[in-house]
Amino acid sequence: MCCSGDDPRRVERDNKPALISRLNRIEGQVRGINRMVQEDRYCIDILTQVAAVKSALDSLAMQLLESHARGCVADAVAAGDGAAAIDELMQVVRKLR
């Protein structure tokens, strides 16, 4: 789903429960890393968990990016407002690299 309602930045997501579930898992992983640091666990084990969190966040970002491109950006292009939407999309892609 794409931007909707009075606020053009408000987004209705069909997959909201799945996104929240994924974010809750990531939050749990970060809490686990915190515990590992507090417990003076082996650095490689901590770094492995950091890599897993980074990968999970990257996957979430790509899912959101795809949803935005297929929804909001596609709608903006169809409405003749594509240049600004593509510029905004490319700014966030650069941040994700």
Image (cartoon, rainbow, N blue to C red):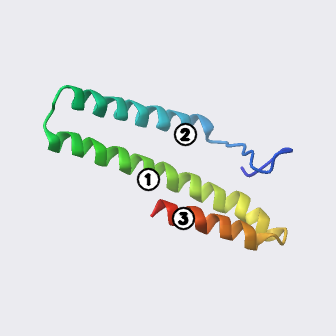
Type of the residue with mark 3: Val
Tell us which disc is closer to us: 1 or 3: 3
Type of the residue with mark 2: Leu
Q: For mark 1, what is the residue?
A: 58
Q: Residue at x 23, y 45 (%)?
A: 48
Tell us which disc is closer to us: 2 or 1: 1
Considering only order in the chain, which callout, 2 or 3, is on the residue closer to the N terminus?
A: 2
Residue 47 coordinates in the image, percent (x, y): 23, 45
Label 3 residue SS: helix
Number of other residues with Cα within 10 Å of mark 1, as a class: few under 14, some 14 to 19, many 20 or more: some
Considering only order in the chain, which callout, 3 or 1, is on the residue closer to the N terminus?
A: 1
Proximity of marks 3 and 2: CB atoms separated by less than 8 Å: no
**Position of residue 7 in the picture relative to residue 23 (left or right):** right
Q: For mark 3, what is the residue?
A: 93
Proximity of marks 2 and 1: CB atoms separated by less than 8 Å: no
Number of other residues with Cα within 10 Å of mark 2, as a class: few under 14, some 14 to 19, many 20 or more: some
Q: For mark 2, what is the residue?
A: 19
Label 2 residue SS: helix
Q: CA distance from mark 3 to mark 2?
A: 19 Å
Residue 13 coordinates in the image, percent (x, y): 67, 43
Q: Residue at x 48, y 60 (%)?
A: 96
Q: CA distance from mark 2 to mark 1?
A: 13 Å
Count of numbered tags = 3
**Position of residue 95 in the picture relative to residue 3 (left or right):** left
